[in-house]
Image: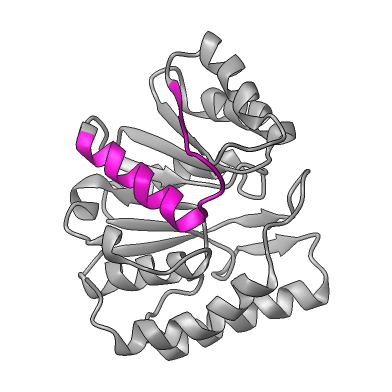
Amino acid sequence: MTPRIVVPTYNERDTIGPLLAELRARLGPAARILVVDDSSPDGTGARVRDVMARDPAVEMLTRPGKQGLASAYQTAFRRVLDEGREDCIVTLDADFSHDPRYVPVLLAAADTHDLVIGSRYVAGGGVDNWGLRRRVLSLGGNWYARRITGTPIRDLTAGLMCLRADFLRTVAFEGLRSKGYAFLIALKTLCHRRGARVAERPIRFVERRGGVSKLSANIVYEGLIEPWRIRFRRLP
C-alpha cells in the first residue's frame, strides 16, 4: 500500500522534527507526509520547513489560526483524495504518543481492511505513563461511546488509523460536525455503518514526550454529548 501520512500540529516544535525523521526511516524515501499546522505560535511551522528543505516528500498545509483536530483531518483527507496519488491515509499525533513503528503494521493490515486502528484496548495493547484518573476517563469514555453509538470498536477515540482511500471516497466525512476527539468517534461510526472492514491492531500508547496535552474540559464534555447525537442522527 502506498500511504500518505497526515500529522496535525499545534505547538509541537520539540517533537515534530524527530517524528518526521523517524517516519522517514520507517517508511523509506517515497512515502509522502503532510503536516497540517494551525499557525502554531511556538515555531512548529519553521521546524517543518527546515525538514522540507531537505526532504521534498514532506509537505505542510498552514492554516490561519487554531481550527481544531476535526477540520485538520477533513481538510487533509480532501486534499489527499483530490490528488489521488496514494492508496491509503495514515493519521497519527505529532507528540510520539503514537510510536511510528506501528505504521508499517497498520499498512500491512490495510491490504485486506478498509479501516485499521492502532488500538490501546485489544489484547496486547495498553497505555504507559498515565495516572489512574486518565486511564479511567479513557476506558470509561470508550465504553460509553460504544454503548451509546452501538459501534463495536474497542478504541473509538484512537488517533492512530489507516484508511483506504478507495473506501474513504464513499464516506461523507466532510458532513461530520463533531469537533476534537469526538470526530474520531463519529468517523469510525460512519465507517462502520458504511460496511467498512475494520481491524484493530494492538499498540502501546505513551504519554506525550513534550509540550502540553490538548485534553480539555470542553473535549470531555463533547465526548459525553456527541455519542447521543451520533446515535440519533442520520449520519451523512
Relative to 217, is 233 above or below?
A: below
Relative to 176, is 160 above or below?
A: above
User: Residue at image x 69%, y 78%?
Assistant: 137
User: Residue at image x 44%, y 17%?
Assistant: 29
Q: Position of residue 163 (x, y in %)?
A: 33, 51
Magenta span contains residue 78: yes
Give the side of residue 86 with respect to residue 181, left or right: left
Magenta span contains residue 160: no
Give the side of residue 20 with respect to residue 148, left or right: right
What range is drawn magenta here?
58-82
Relative to 48, is 201 above or below?
A: below
Classify the position of the C terminus by image quarter.
bottom left
Farthest residue in the top direction? 54
Q: Position of residue 196 (x, y in %)?
A: 25, 65
Farthest residue in the front direction? 64
| Foreground residue among 72 and 7 | 72
| Foreground residue among 75 and 190 | 75
User: Residue at image x 57%, y 39%?
Assistant: 100
Quadrant housing residue 16: top right
| Foreground residue among 184 and 96 | 184
Give the side of residue 143 with respect to residue 19, left or right: left
